């Protein structure tokens, strides 16, 4: 099937940024990474007179590990991220878990981690754990480069903190440090109607740092489809910090969480179901994260 759209395939990043620049003369440019989301929209006529900007030739398919961070280029596929992060210690392993839950392996072999984030969808699974890991999103344009904290990146469904002339070139993930004998653990769970190949009804990710005494030093919680975009659960995190994890504490944490999510009704799940199930999934991922931290 032929797609009714223009096509640009720049050979380097500078050329791509020139095309994206406001005065380039090419309008309605849509960045095309793996295309697993974009091409469906073009085919369905949801993008008006688009020209796709193929970024596969820009050398952005790198993963670079430095002493205190990891840089994941915008063309790194979810399969590659799944494999790379699986070999890393807690809590970085978390990024492998969520990357490996997107679609099926055929999708993950072409879909990119950055593309997942840039859909701006509340159901973007891999974005949820990037929120827990406090990643930064590198945006570049002819005007320069900036690093946007991921919790400032999502503005609503398909709305991002990106200017029209900007492109995401990499995702920067800091390596968490646990001083004084602290230990990390993390977990991610998505709920849906089948075991595999489904869009999340909801998802929750957790990164937990336990101190030497076993209490919560730091909690990082994020969720998908429980608000118009993936969000951090800041109030629930604050509530858990400094406390020993007990069933009673998690029950109260669930009440705090209810106050900061805004699920909606859809054909995949009702608002009430999402609220109740979201709280249960939060309790499970916190418990599993604590178990993993205990083993680390
Ligand atoms: C069968 C199937 C199953 C799926 N299952 C899931 C699932 O379980 N969970 C899930 O989260 N998603 C799922 N998806 C959606 C999609 O596959 C993923 O979100 C994927 O990660 C998107 O990556 P991509 O590289 O294909 O993005 P593309 O389709 O290339 O781009 C997606 C959007 O991001 C923009 N974009 C891409 N890269 C950049 C960049 N570098 N800078 C700025 N903007 C950019 C594009 O313009 C477009 O608007 C599924 C899709 C299919 C077809």
Image (tube, grey):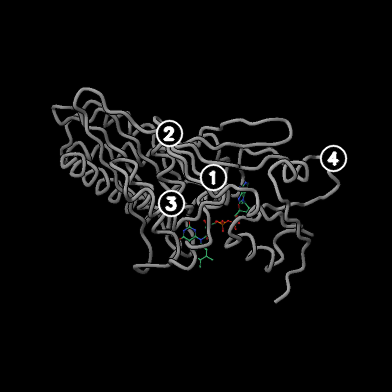
Measure the alpha-carbon separation of dots 4 and 1.
26 Å
Q: Which residue is mark 1?
A: 73
Q: Which residue is mark 4?
A: 23
Q: Nearer the viewer, residue 246 or 34?
A: 34
Measure the alpha-carbon separation of dots 3 and 4.
35 Å
Q: Earlier in the sequence, mark 3 or mark 4?
A: 4
Q: Is residue 99 above or below residue 208?
A: below
Measure the alpha-carbon separation of dots 2 and 3.
16 Å
Q: Residue, x 31% and y 40% (percent of image)?
A: 91
Cβ–Cβ under 8 Å for marks 2 and 3: no
Measure the alpha-carbon separation of dots 2 and 1.
14 Å
- Drawn side of residue 207 relative to residue 21, left or right: left
Q: Indicate if the residue with disc 3 has its beta carbon within 8 Å of ligand 1.
A: no
Q: Is residue 177 above or below residue 2?
A: above
Indicate which label's residue lies in the foreground, 4 or 1. 1
Measure the alpha-carbon separation of dots 2 and 4.
37 Å
Q: Which residue is mark 3?
A: 81
Considering the image in quadrants, where does the N terminus appear?
A: bottom right
Q: Quadrant of residue 200?
A: bottom left
Dot 1 alpha-carbon crowd within 10 angstroms: few under 14, some 14 to 19, many 20 or more: many
Q: Earlier in the sequence, mark 4 or mark 1?
A: 4
> Quick check: which quadrant has ligand 1?
bottom right
Q: Residue, x 58% and y 47% (percent of image)?
A: 60
| Picture disc at residue 66 | 2
């Amino acid at each position: 099937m032929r797609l009714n759209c223009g096509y640009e395939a720049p050979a380097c990043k500078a050329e791509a940024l020139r095309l994206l620049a406001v005065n380039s003369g090419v309008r309605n440019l849509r960045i095309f990474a793996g295309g697993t989301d974009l091409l469906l929209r073009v085919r369905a006529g949801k993008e008006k007179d688009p020209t796709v900007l193929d970024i596969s030739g820009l050398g952005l398919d790198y993963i670079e590990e430095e002493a205190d961070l990891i840089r994941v280029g915008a063309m790194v596929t979810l399969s590659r991220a799944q494999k790379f992060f699986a070999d890393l210690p807690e809590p970085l392993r978390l990024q492998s878990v969520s990357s490996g839950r997107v679609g099926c392996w055929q999708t993950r072999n072409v879909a990119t981690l950055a593309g997942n984030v840039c859909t701006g969808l509340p159901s973007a699974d891999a974005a949820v754990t990037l929120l827990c890991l406090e990643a930064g999103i590198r945006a570049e344009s002819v005007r320069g480069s900036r690093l946007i904290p991921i919790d400032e990146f999502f503005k609503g469904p398909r709305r991002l903190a990106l200017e029209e002339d900007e492109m995401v070139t990499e995702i920067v993930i800091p390596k968490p440090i646990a001083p004084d004998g602290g230990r990390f653990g993390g977990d991610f769970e998505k709920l849906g109607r089948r075991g595999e190949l489904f869009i999340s009804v909801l998802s929750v990710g957790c990164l937990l740092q336990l101190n030497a005494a076993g209490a919560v030093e730091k909690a990082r919680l994020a969720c998908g489809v429980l608000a118009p975009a993936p969000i951090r659960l800041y109030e629930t995190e604050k509530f858990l910090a400094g406390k020993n994890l007990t069933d009673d504490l998690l029950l109260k944490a669930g009440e705090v969480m209810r106050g900061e999510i805004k699920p909606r009704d859809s054909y995949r799940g009702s608002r009430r179901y999402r609220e109740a199930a979201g709280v249960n999934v939060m309790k499970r991922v916190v418990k599993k994260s604590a178990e993993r931290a205990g083993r680390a």
